[in-house]
Amino acid sequence: EAYAVLSDEKRKKMYDALEINFKPLPSDAEELTAENLDTLVRGSEPGTLWVVQVYAEWHKASIGFANAWENVVQSLDPSGAGVGVRFGRIHMKEQEALCKSLSVAIRVLPTVLSFRDGQLLRVATFGRDTQTDSMLLRDFIDTQLEDRSGHLDLATAAAFIQ
């Protein structure tokens, strides 16, 4: 199929216009899978806030969000040492079953989820410009560090809950 597309000049131009990225989006965040989510996120030290991005490297908004995500991850130390925040990522297509098992429907990429003590707290979508996304992501994290009640904020997640 790929050969047929790339050998036909008209189809090749259409393919090239899609601006698909097949390069990995490197991150200092932990890559989360169905095999390690329970251990890392749900079994983490009590009170630890996990901020988890659902992404795909070929998705234009995920590509655009990558710099904002990394700026925040690196500024807060991805290991969470001293801050109480850990960062993870879930690849939407490679971990499709895991995404479907979450208590929210992922409809927009990138989507950022937060968990504390194994419970989903908040959901937000991003995909603006790097400066705005960095500011909004920091605010998303900071408000949860201030509010350690551990309850799901239904006002921010209502549109996503299945």
Image (cartoon, rainbow, N blue to C red):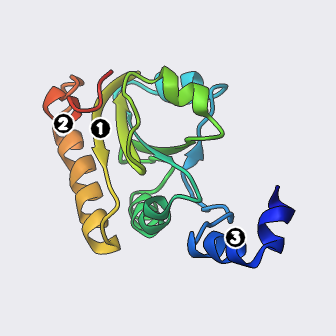
**In this orientation, which residue lies closer to the viewer: 12 or 47?**
12
- At label 2, the amino acid type is Thr
Are the residues tagged 2 and 1 within 8 Å (C-beta)?
yes
Amino acid of disc 1: Val
- Residue 156 image point, x, y percent: 18, 36
- In the picture of the structure, the residue carrying the numbered disc 1 is 123
At horizontal 61% and vertical 41% (from top left) the residue drawn is 93
Q: Is residue 49 above or below residue 37?
A: below
Mark 1: which secondary structure?
strand
Q: Earlier in the sequence, mark 2 or mark 1?
A: 1
Specify which label sits upstream in the sequence, 3 or 1.
3
Residue 119, percent from left and from top: 35, 21
- Give the foreground label among 3 and 1: 3
Instruction: Name the residue beneath numbered marker 2.
Output: 156
Q: CA distance from mark 2 to mark 1?
A: 6 Å
User: Callout 1: 10 Å neighbours few (<14), some, many (20+)?
Assistant: many
Please give the residue where the numbered disc 3 appears in the rendered image: 11
The numbered mark at residue 33 is: none
Tell me the distance, in whole angstroms, between the alpha carbons under discs 2 and 3: 42 Å
